[in-house]
Image (spheres, grey):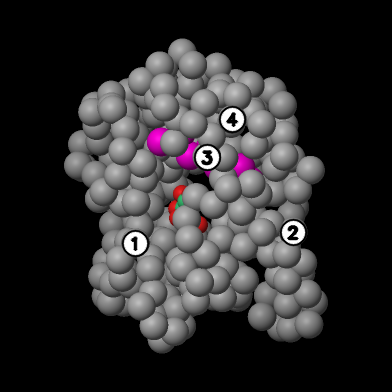
């Protein structure tokens, strides 16, 4: 399953994060990332020191969008799901994401299903009204929940109207990585919307390379600085996936 924002490119789409603490750092990272031609750029705005400055954030999104046609994902990862500590209350954060939806040309926004339902609903409405795709996500930096739990959360993301359901989980064993791939196939078969999954950390790297074969449409690769453990450099990731798809085309 694909999302038309990527036009005729084929999955998996490679997403590279921007993690600068200041406007200058974000733009500097962007400059270094562009020649690596990712399919999607994620601005992890929770890294920005001045996140409370709404005008600054809106201007920076506008600047990124004016610099490149590569689709942009705006994320303020919640601290309770592995993001940076931020000074904003959840109300202020939802207001900021809403302003980004209303006033910028951002393509995607990400929000966690673990947040209060009223906030998830608010983000779904404002993103829909403004033609932005919503990734409803779940992260676990400690372990890989059992399959039933992942399936339950995937259904929840779809019930809340996700355009994409995303799961990033931490394996303790190699079996956890294989299980995550298996449950990726399960939720991809089950949901009407595309899914994105990854197993983090060193051993999880395998899922970033072969997740597409199980239905995961986006894989995160590092351009300048990691936003999560286990991300593989974009160039190598792209080459490895391309080779894998060429050698075993029957998985596509
Ligand atoms: O959800 C994800 C996936 C991720 O956690 C990863 O493991 O690559 C990286 C995050 O920046 C992004 O928001």
Separation of disc 4 and disc 1 at Cα?
26 Å
The image position of residue 235, as x and y in percent, is 74, 59
User: For the residues carrying marks 4 and 2, which lies nearer the camera in this image?
Assistant: 4
Q: Which residue in the protein does label 3 denote?
A: 19
Mark 3 residue CB less than 8 A from any atom of ligand 1: no
When the figure is inspected, residue 174 is found, relative to residue 116, above or below; the finding is below
Ligand 1: does it lie within 8 Å of the C-beta at label 1?
no
Residue 100 pos. (x, y %): 46, 24
Locate residue 226 relative to residue 91 in the image: left or right: right
| Residue 226 horizontal/vertical position (percent) | 54, 52
Residue drawn where x is 56% and y is 23% of the image: 23
Q: Is residue 102 above or below residue 235?
A: above
Residue that badge 4 annotates: 25
The majority secondary structure of the magenta stretch comes to: strand
Mark sitting earlier along the chain (4/1): 4
Q: Position of residue 2 (x, y in %)?
A: 60, 57
Q: Quote the CA–CA distance across marks 3 and 1.
A: 18 Å
* Residue identified by numbered label 2: 235
- Going from N to C along the chain, the mark reached first, 3 or 1, is 3
């Amino acid at each position: 399953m694909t999302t038309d924002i990527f036009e005729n490119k084929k999955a998996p789409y490679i997403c590279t994060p921007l993690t600068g603490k200041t406007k200058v750092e974000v733009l500097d990272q962007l400059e270094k990332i562009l020649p690596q031609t990712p399919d999607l750029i994620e601005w992890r705005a929770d890294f920005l020191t001045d996140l409370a400055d709404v005008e600054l954030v809106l201007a920076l999104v506008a600047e990124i969008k004016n610099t490149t046609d590569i689709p942009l994902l705006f994320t303020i990862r919640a601290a309770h799901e592995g993001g940076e500590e931020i000074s904003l209350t959840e109300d202020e954060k939802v207001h900021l994401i809403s302003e980004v939806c209303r006033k910028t040309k951002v393509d995607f926004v990400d929000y966690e299903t673990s947040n209060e339902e009223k906030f998830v609903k608010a983000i779904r409405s404002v993103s829909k009204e403004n033609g932005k795709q919503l990734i409803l996500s779940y992260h676990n930096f400690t372990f890989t929940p059992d399959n039933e739990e992942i399936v339950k959360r995937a259904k929840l993301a779809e019930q809340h109207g996700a355009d994409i359901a995303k799961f990033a989980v931490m394996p303790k064993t190699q079996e956890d990585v294989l299980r995550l791939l298996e449950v990726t196939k399960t939720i991809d078969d089950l949901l009407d919307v595309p899914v994105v999954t990854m197993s983090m950390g060193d051993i999880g790297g395998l899922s970033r390379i072969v997740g597409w074969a199980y239905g995961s449409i986006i894989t995160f690769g590092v351009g300048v600085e990691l936003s999560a453990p286990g991300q593989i450099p974009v160039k190598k990731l792209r080459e490895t996936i391309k080779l894998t798809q060429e050698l075993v085309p029957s998985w596509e």
